[in-house]
Each structure stands twice: as structure tokens, then as C-alpha cells.
Image (spheres, coloured by chain):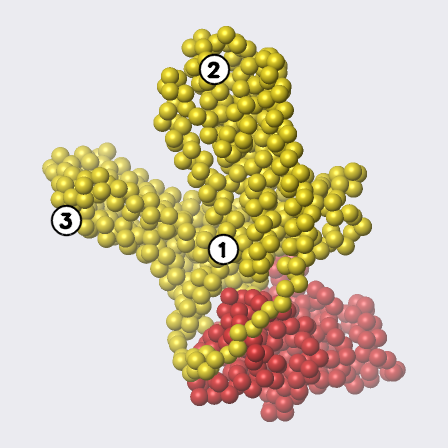
Chain colours: A red, B yellow
Amino acid sequence: MLVLKNVTKSYDGNKNAVDNLSLEIKAGEIFGFLGPNGAGKTTALKMIAGILQPTAGDIFLRGYSILSQPLEAKKQFSFVSDNPNVFLRFKGIEYLKFMADIYEVDPSVREDRVRALSNEFAMTDVLNDPISSYSHGMRQKIVIIGALIHDPPVWLLDEPMTGLDPKSSFNLKNRMHAHTAANQTVLFSTHVLEVAEKICDRVGIIDKGRLIFVGTIAEMAEHFKEHKSLEEMFLELTEEESPTFEE
Amino acid sequence: MKKWWMLTKALVRGSDAFGTGARKKKGRITLVSKGLDGTKRIFLAVLAVAYVSVVFGIQGWALAEQFLLMGFKGNNPGADPVLLAALRSGIGQLYLPGFFLLLGMGFIYSAGIFYFAEDLDTLLALPLKPATIVAAKISNLYIFSIIIPAALTMPGVIVLGYRLAMPPLYYFYAVLLLLFGSVIPMCLDAIVILLMMRVSVFTKSKDRFMIITQILMFVGIFAFIISNASVNNNMGQPTQVPPSNVRYVVPLSDKAIEAMTLPNDPFSPLKMLSLIVLALISVALLVALSSRIYLRAARESRSRGQVHKPMTGKEWKKLQKTSSDFGNMVLREFKSLLRSPVYVFNILIFPLIMVVVLVGSMLFAFMGQGGNIAAIRAEFSQLFSPEGLKNTLPYVLVGLCAGIAFLSSTNYCMTTAISREGKEVGYLKSWPLKISTVFASKLAIGELISLVSWLPVIFLIYVLVPLNIYFHLTVTILLLFLPATVNVTSLLIDLRRPILGWTSEQSLVKQNMNVLKSMLLAAVQGGILVGVSLLALSLGAGIAIITVILAAGSILLFALSVSLLTTMGKRYYLERVY
């Protein structure tokens, strides 16, 4: 479903923000990207979304290369950035219509989808207001609704729970499960280890641009051969001098 | 007292009242790419102040020469009253720009310090008396306010005093007039801003607040221009002593100027004192209003609720209508610009002003001829006589080319086309859109603005100027292709170094070196055509050759710019925009 092949990104030509990252995320999988601040999670997600150009390597979304077939690749996913301040001059409903047009959502299903998603995220009452009048959490929700409106196979979410109220956060997690149950894929980054522990099928821990662990939480615990919390294991992994784990 | 001074220093040095410090510093920062850092800003400000000081110093010198020729020297109570009145008027002229500009700019300063500086929540949480905060804010405002009149006024006043051998009291009174005279327009502006802050509609929208503030600023500055023009009409005629309009901005400044011209007169200290008392009353009023209005307004403006507009059946129906990627992107650009008062004002107002100025001046010419089109056409037809075609029209066309190139670069819509996406540009890049669609949608809006600016001019030219193949062909092609070329190159410049880390649209438009670079490049584009044309003229080329150079040259430049956009522009978009 989503394949990263030896992906490297350097901003200055010297230091790699992402260093030779290879990863395969299968259909039906919720994959969590974990890592300290500045580890390279957002850079990796932005390369997958086609926002940043990899310095080396390639990324394939359902077989389409983001470099050589960007339009086809981009139709396979939706992206939610860590910054939801998007289109502040649009009304919520205008933004959703725009997204539906860009992703060519059939007009006959738009209204049902928008109604369902906006009800689920408690946004129906504010759809006719400018996004600039929304709170941070409401902006996050309108961006998430916009991302889900075309029901893409792959969800790329950068810190999606930030600013969400408990109910919306719960609903989003449920949607992620439902999405992968339909044999689709979710890739998201988070700092909240409890979230990763509860909903991820697998996690990847990235530190200083390198993927230092990929596997299930159980596999991580097996590596440490003693009962530790995810938090303890995460801290230990990211403090070590990056012993790379192969899948 | 100590806390007041500590806070004042902190506000002057550290407050982001004008949105200048919030720029994201990423990668290499250069003077012309990512804006200016503090040191460079100060350096450029000092250069600008020095330049202005020299200009106004020269004005003082010229004025002194005039009075020396009339026989005036030093403190001369016995001088001819008409001569003294003329000197007072001259000194008033030296103070006029500083005080009038302060009247205009003071609105921006006051709004920046009282309204836009998002430091009040922090300040109110500190163990400071509200009076200390208000006093520090007013001191902060005063420090900013005094710079303009000091730079514009004092060089001329000092040079004038030196050349006329005025006694030391003249300089003392001059400084007092500057220090206390500045207080009055400053307080007036600040009080207006404070009152605006009490009007609930403004507290909901920073953009709207800024628009109103800018309109006030322009009113202040235009007042100076009009005032200056009316005085200039009377200057040089000492028998008709012109009124010193500066007294309308700084009441009693005329009395203070009287004191300056006769510094040793026993009534002079009283005259100065009257100004000082008025200034202190203004400050007292401002302090009283600040304590009552500012803190309350600022608190309340942060606690207003939001009333939502419900969705209607019509709104839901709109979801059924589909549009193409290009159509959607153009609509998105259009809405995002139109709904941003800052953009509407800063981007659209300049092209519109150009239209008003150009079309307005043409209409004035039209009215001057008694509304007789035939008379105007007859005047223009002289351009197309054999003599005119040879000696005048080529230069008219060359001049038009230079003007069009320069005026086109004031379309700030294109120089911020990518930058205005801000940090969320990633969304745009993550959508399945062709890069050419993104560029085309931005250029479409840029072209629309250019056409809004130029179509009325084209229309008037066709109505007022008798048809001539050289003139109409060249002007039409220039007006269509030169602005388009400037738009494309402006987009290219913005793609090359986009400024995405802004927090205020105002600072993006106002403090963006890409805007200056686009203007420079537009001048180069116009310069190429003008240079080649002038070279051809010096080699004996006729109007036909000039027409070909200008028309074909502008088309060629457009093709070249599009070619650069599709190659370099795409590369920049992929590699630099994130």
C-alpha cells in the first residue's frame, strides 16, 4: 500500500533530516510514527505527501511513485498537517466543497458525507462560518473532515489528535479502525504514546532521521525482554545510539 | 518610576507591535530574501533618516538664503513685520511635513502599540499597576512618534538658524516645539484609536481595524500634500503672507514659532508655555482615556463570544455543483484575496489608484476642453503629423513603455502569490493538482487585477486618441503583454524565495523584499525595451522600427518569462516551497 525506498532528505546538503528510510506499510494497517521533536517524522510525512522532494530514494502509494506519477499518487491519500490554519477566508462548507471538487467526489454522495462527518465531529452548526472564526480544535476538525470527504485509501495524519476534544478524538480513532478494517491504511505521527499503544498495529520509531525500530508493541517488549511501559522503551530507544532494527 | 522605565524600554525593544519580529527564520537569511534582521533594519533606518535630514537641511539652507537676500539677520525685533511673518511662515513650512506625517503615521503607531501588540495579556499578568502599563505604552508611542518630526524638521530648522545667526534661545524653543508639538497630534491619534477600540465591530476584526487605521493615515498624509500645495502656491510672495497650516495640526504652534523668530522678546516664554500647557493637557486626557478605555477595551475584546450562522438549504445545494481544478483554484484565489481586507487594500488599491490617477487626469483634460472630444482628438492628432511621427511619437511610446512597466509592478498580488499560502502551503502541494494549474490560477487573478487597472486606460485611449496604427498597436500590445510579463516574473521571484513563515498579512505585504525585487525586475524589463528603442532612435530608426521593437520586444519578454516559469518556476515550486 505504502512503500518508502531508501528515502533521504537533506535541507542543507550536509545533515540528513531523514536518513535512508525504508519502510513498507501494508493494507489494513494503522502505523504510528513516533519520535522526539525534530526527529524527522513531519519531514517523512511531507515527503510521502509530495510536499517535500526527497534528496534520494522514492515513495510509492499503491504502486504510484510520488516523484514520477505525482497526480495519481496524490489521489491515493489525504493529508492532515500539524497546522490546521488552512483557508481561513473560506467558510467551512466552501472548504469542503473545494476539497470534494479537487478529489472529484461524486456530487450525489457529497451532501451525505459532509452531513455525516460534520455531525460526527460536531461541526454542522459552524459550517456556514469563516474558518478564521474557528478555534484551533475546530480548524483541526474541518481539515480532518476535508481529508476524509473523498474516502481515500491511505490516510496521512500529522499529529491529528492535537486540539481535538475527547469525543472527536474518540470518533477519529474509531474511524481509523473502521478504515483499516476495510483493508485500507492509516499512517500517523504522534507524541502521545498511549494513543500509539492503543490503536497502532505497528509503530516506527524515528530518531535523528533514522528509523531505529519498526514493529508491534509486543515485538518491542520482546526486544527488551523485560516488562516495561511503552514510554520507558521509547525513552531507552531514543537515548541509545540508534541500533537499527530490521523488520 | 523605575518599573515604568523598565517596561518602556522592554516595549520599545521587544514589543512586536508592528508584526516585524514574528518572521520565521529558516535557512539562509539575506538582506533581500527573508526580510531584514534587526541590525540591518536599524542601519537602513539610519540611512533613510540621514537622507531625509540632508534633504530637509537643504530646504532650510535655501530658505535662509532667501531671507539673507531680504536683509534678515538674527534676532531682529525691528525687522519689517511682513518679513517676520514670512520667516514664521517659512519655519512653519519646515515643521509642516513632520507634524502632518506624524498626524498620519501616528494612527499606525497608536494602533500598533495599543491594539495590535499582543502583549497585554502578558503585561496584565505581571505585578504592575495599570497606570504603569499605560504610562509605558504612551512613552513607547512617544518614542516612536518623535522620530518622524525630528528627522524631517530639525535639520532644516537648525540650518536656518545657523545661516540667519539666530541666538541660542531659538534652538531651545525649536526643540521645545518639536518635543511638545509632537505630543498633540500623537495624543489626538491615540485617542481616536482608543475610541475605535471601544466600538465592538472593530474589536472582532484586526484586518478591518487596520483598514480604518490606514485610511486615517492616508487622510493625514493627503492633508499634508494638499496643505503643502496650497502654501506653495503662495510662497515667494512676502506681501501676501501665507498662513502656516501647521497650526491646524499643532494648535498654538504659530505662537511658538513667533517665539522662535523673536526669542529674546519678553512674551516669548509665555508663548512657548502656552504650547507646553496644551501638550500636557493632551497627555492628561490620553492618560485618563487610556486607563478607562484601553485596558477595558482590550480585556473585553478578548472575551467576546461568537454567533454562528446556520447552514441553509441553499448552502447544502451548493455542494452539488462541481467545478474544474482551474476554476476551483481561481475561485479560491479570488475569495482569499477579496475576503482579506489587508489584501484588498494593499494589493488592489494601488492599481486602482493608478487607474484613478491616469483616468482622472485624462478626464480633467477632457473637461478642460469643455467636454469637447473633437478638440482633444485634434490635439492628439498632432502626434501623428509627419513631424510628430518623427520627433515626438517615438519618445511618447518609449515613455509609455517605461511607465507601464513600473506601474505594473505595483500589483502586489503576484509578488505574494506563493508566500500568502503561508505555512499551510503543504496542503496545496499535497493535492492532486498539476503545477501548471496552480500557476495558471494565480496568474489568472494577477492578470485580472492588471486588466482592471489597464482596461479603462486602453478604453480611453481608443476614445480620445485618433486611430493610428503605430500608436494603438504599440500601446495595446504593451498594455497587454508588459503587465503579464511583470506578473509572471513576480511569481517567479516569489517562488524562488517564498516567505511562508509570516503571522500577519500586513507584514507579508509591507515587509517583503520580493516586492522590491519585482519592481526592480519590472524596471529592468521596461529598461531593456526603452534602452533598445533609444539606441535604435540614436541610429536613425523611425517610428515603424520603434513600434516593432516595443511590440515584438514585449511579446518576446513575455514568452521568455513564461518559459522560465515552466522550467525554473516548477523546479522552485518542488524544491523550495514548503
Q: Position of residue B369 (x, y in %)?
A: 19, 40
Q: How many residues crowd around disc 3 within 10 Å: few (fewer than 14), some, or many (20 or more)?
A: some
The local secondary structure at tag 3 comes to: loop
Nearer to us of marks 3 and 2 is 2
The local secondary structure at tag 1 comes to: helix
Residue type at mark 2: give it: Leu
> Which residue occupies the extreme bottom position in the image?
A182
Residue type at mark 1: give it: Val
Real-space CA distance between mark 3 and mark 2, rounded to the nearest whole angstrom: 57 Å
In this picture, residue A100 sits left or right of residue B113: left
Q: Chain of mark 2?
A: B
Q: Are marks 1 and 3 on the same chain?
A: yes
Q: Position of residue B161 (x, y in %)?
A: 54, 16
Real-space CA distance between mark 2 and mark 1, rounded to the nearest whole angstrom: 47 Å
Q: Which residue is mark 3?
A: B467
Circles 3 and 2: CB distance less than 8 Å?
no
Numbered tag placed on residue B342 in the rendering? 1
Q: Chain of mark 1?
A: B
The answer to whether any part of residue A21 appears in the image is no
Q: Which residue is mark 2?
A: B84
Residue at 64%, 29% (x, y): give it: B277
Q: How many residues crowd around disc 1 within 10 Å: few (fewer than 14), some, or many (20 or more)?
A: many
